[in-house]
Image (cartoon, rainbow, N blue to C red):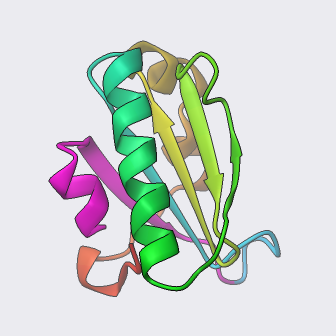
Amino acid sequence: MVALEDGKAEDIVTIDLVGKSSIADTMVVASGRSDRHVGAVADRVLRALKEAGFGKAAVEGLQTCDWVLIDAGNVIVHLFRPEVRAFYNLEKMWSSEIPRERAVI
């Protein structure tokens, strides 16, 4: 979460997936102001994960940076440009937020 905030990600939402899906325990959804900003925030998150000992996370979407998915095992991070985020509306699909204090990133 700190890496997202330090990178000035916007509208950060954390969704608890426990009991809803086996893909991860937590999903984090955030926005960047532009494709360059999304890419920069993704790089920051990837560096933070590596420095924290989580190794190399799987990443998709860095080529265009409209939507970058970072799969860090128990945590999945989705970074969007605002209009792409509004189109897919993952928060509505997965609903129920968890407090930021319980977030791992």
Q: Is residue 78 magenta?
A: no
**Residue at x 31%, y 26% (from the top left corner):** 37
Query: In the rendered image, which quarter contains the N terminus?
Result: bottom left
Residue 44 horizontal side relative to residue 56, left or right:
left
- x then y, percent, for residue 34: 33, 16
Q: Toward the viewer: 7 or 91?
A: 7
Question: Which residue is located at x 60 percent, y 55 percent?
Answer: 94
Location of residue 74 (image quadrant): bottom right
Q: Residue at x 54, y 45 (%)?
A: 78
Q: Which residues are magenta?
A: 1-18
Q: Taking 94 as reference, is 35 above or below it? A: above
Q: Name the residue: 42% across, 13% down.
A: 83
Residue 21 sits above or below residue 65 on the image: below
Q: Quadrant of residue 61?
A: top right
Q: Position of residue 51 (x, y in %)?
A: 43, 77
Q: How many marks?
A: 0
Q: Position of residue 53 (x, y in %)?
A: 53, 85
Q: Residue furthest right?
A: 22
Where is residue 19, by image quadrant?
bottom right
Query: From the image, which quarter does the C terminus lie in?
Result: bottom left
Side (left or right) of 30 relative to 2: right
Q: Is residue 91 rendered to the left or right of residue 6? A: right
